[in-house]
Image: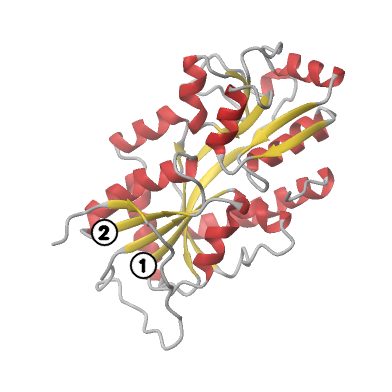
Amino acid sequence: MRANWIAVAAAVTTLCSTSNFAAPSNETWPSKTIRVLAAGAAGGPIDIMSRVVMQKLSDQLGQSIVIDNRGGAGGTLATRIAVSATPDGHTLLCNSSQYAAAYSLYKDPGYNAFKDFAPIINAGTSPNIIFVHPNTAAKNLTELIALGKKQKLQYGSAGAGSTPHLTGERLLKLMAGLNIEHVPYSSAMPAILATASNQVPIGLTAMPPSVQLIKSGRIRGIAVTSLQRMPSLPDVGTVAEQGFPGYEDYTWIAFFAPAGTPKAIVDKLNKSIAAIVVMPESKERLSVLGFDPVNNTADQFTAYIKVEVSKWAKVIKESGAKAD
């Protein structure tokens, strides 16, 4: 049996046509290496979740799994590739809540959010987090908003179409009334490092990749968008407790298969991933980073996507958010 491995793909491979395709049975799948198109850069939330889950899944299936990072353009680069993949369970997509947001933000996202994929599972959620360079005068969200009333500020995010981008538009622009400029980066880590080096005064990303830099003091956490404070950063207050009662936004990380993938394979993946994210080792690793596992069926996740698309479409329309 081939040794299990997880690797970053070195180049784009040619995807098979779905014509004349005979669907595999649950018993014969997987029959070859599984490719996971990760719609985010290495080190970001999507990449982290992909590797935690797929290492365990590879062990369970006794089959190799390749993580192919395709970040950029609000996740649409990876999603466009995955759309045309053969629906045999050997090509999967790992994307975040940007899947729902980018669908409305981009004039031509290259996919139909409701028809082109078979949602497998929402594997985990994380609040978004607002942070600043340590030299920034603001110590909390109230002070940051007060500062923004006096001068025009910038905030960096993981890119146009990411939910942190739209959290900034919704919270800082619409609700707080700030004249603030969005600076998109290629992924979460460049936005975090740009804030740490004071290229931009404010950063807004999903929580996981920022935790260690906040703990080390390279950036200062201002507010998390969960309703309760996060155990990994207990000193960072919530948006809800800093003047915006009931406010919450999350970045979720999920797995998809191309539409037409046999339901038996989708269901097997759902059950396997749901079990993996609550394993003590996986749960501890993810919770330290700010992820909470989600126990949901494929049908429940499908319904949730419809809610998310509607929610972010409204924010995009009201804020005038742009893809560039």
> Relative to 209, does residue 299 appear above or below in the rendering?
below
Image marks 1 and 2: residues in contact by CB distance under 8 Å: no
Nearest the viewer among 7 and 261 is 7
Q: Earlier in the sequence, mark 1 or mark 2?
A: 2
Query: Disc number at residue 90?
Result: 1
Residue 200: % across, % down: 68, 27
Asked where in the image residue 318 lies, by quadrant, the reply is top right
Residue receiving disc 2? 64
Residue 178: % across, % down: 83, 28
> Relative to 322, does residue 164 appear above or below in the rendering?
above
Nearest the viewer among 190 and 148 is 190
**The residue under label 2 is which amino acid type?**
Ser
Tally the numbered discs.
2
Nearest the viewer among 238 and 199 is 199
Q: Is residue 128 left or right of residue 264?
A: right
Q: Is residue 96 left or right of residue 27?
A: right
